[in-house]
């Protein structure tokens, strides 16, 4: 139960606040949402590396079964894909970061120009979430006294430290995990007999995708079977499509 302001003397309120903080320190929670930024980039990079490289090697193998040509195509796909992932992630996440920065700057200007309206706006957000009007007004006042821009960024714009865009982190994570993912099908090309490259790469890549889906789901606290089926389905569809195209092209040539 949270005491209403004014019910206790200042010393009692200080003691109550200290007791609450002590209980909060004892009650630690570990949430997984702070992993969203790098986890999304890591899963996307590794998944794309496996699927695109496996599909590329299978397509080339069905058209021209020579191991050398398959490896050259696969390595070229690995390098090009890693660079593309890094550039794409950096550009897209930088655009998000620019938008966030512009919104925060706009909010800072509005706070300086009309703090009362901004207070009312913040209080209205809390009322809409179910807080009593008087309590919402007091909460908004205290939060703005502590960090007005932070309160509005978090509660009005939905921008927090955990969700803030990090372009360099996303780019490096995607490039690194794409390279690791792409290396797995290439390794199968190297170790598999030439006549079994296609089925070996396909089977191993599906196994890698299932493992990736499971690890990503566990890291993010999501259901594992659903993630495994999802990545397995789209991976199999991509490999089957390129195998069909490679066979048609190889036959035509």
Image (cartoon, rainbow, N blue to C red):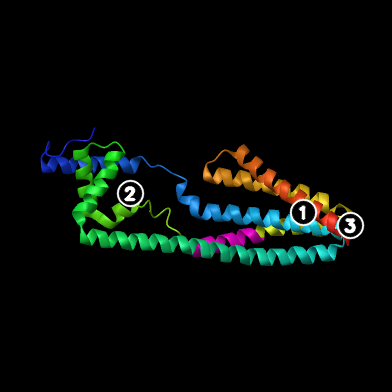
Is the N terminus in the top left, top right, bottom left or bottom right quadrant? top left
Query: Picture coordinates of residue 168 (x, y %)?
Result: 50, 65
User: How many C-alpha atoms fall within 10 Å of the one at disc 3: few (<14), some, or many (≥20)?
Assistant: few
Give the labeled residue for mark 3: 251
Q: How far apart are marks 3 and 1 (CA)?
A: 14 Å
- Classify mark 2: helix, strand or loop: helix
Q: Which of marks 3 and 1 is in front?
A: 3
Residue farthest front in this picture = 252
Q: Is 26 rendered above or below residue 119? A: above
Q: Residue 63 or 4: which is nearer the viewer?
A: 63
Q: What stretch is highlighted in magenta?
A: 166-179
Tell me which secondary structure the magenta stretch mostly adopts.
helix
Q: Indicate which disc residue 65 carries.
A: none
Res. 70 image quadrant:
bottom right
Judge whether residue 180 can be spotted in this image.
yes
Q: Is mark 3 on a helix, strand or loop?
A: helix
In the shown orientation, is residue 175 left or right of residue 97?
right
Q: How many labels does the image show?
A: 3
Query: What is the C-alpha distance between the residues marked 3 and 2?
Result: 60 Å
What residue would you read off at disc 2? Answer: 155
Q: Mark 1 to mark 2: distance in Å?
A: 47 Å
User: Residue 48 location in percent, x, y?
Assistant: 65, 55
Q: Any magenta on residue 173?
A: yes
For label 1, the residue is: 242
Callout 1: helix, strand or loop? helix
């Amino acid at each position: 139960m949270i005491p209403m302001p004014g019910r206790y003397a200042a010393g009692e309120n200080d003691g109550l606040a200290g007791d609450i903080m002590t209980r909060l320190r004892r009650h630690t929670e570990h949430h997984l949402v702070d992993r969203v930024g790098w986890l999304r980039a890591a899963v996307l990079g590794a998944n794309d590396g496996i699927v695109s490289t496996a599909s590329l090697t299978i397509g080339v193998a069905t058209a021209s079964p020579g191991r050398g040509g398959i490896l050259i195509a696969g390595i070229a796909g690995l390098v090009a894909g890693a660079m593309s992932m890094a550039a794409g992630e950096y550009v897209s996440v930088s655009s998000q970061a620019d938008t966030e920065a512009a919104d925060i700057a706009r909010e800072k200007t509005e706070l300086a120009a009309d703090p009362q309206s901004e207070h009312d706006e913040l209080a209205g957000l809390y009322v809409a979430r179910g807080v009593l009007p008087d309590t919402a007004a007091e909460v908004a006042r205290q939060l703005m006294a502590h960090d007005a821009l932070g309160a509005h960024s978090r509660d009005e714009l939905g921008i927090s430290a955990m969700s803030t865009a990090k372009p360099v982190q996303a780019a490096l994570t995607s490039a690194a995990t794409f390279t690791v993912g792409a290396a797995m099908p290439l390794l199968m090309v190297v170790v598999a007999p030439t006549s079994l490259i296609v089925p070996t790469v396909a089977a191993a890549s599906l196994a890698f995708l299932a493992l990736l889906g499971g690890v990503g789901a566990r890291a993010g606290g999501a259901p594992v079977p659903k993630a495994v089926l999802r990545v397995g389905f789209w991976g199999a569809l991509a490999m089957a499509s390129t195998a069909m195209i490679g066979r048609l092209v190889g036959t035509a040539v």
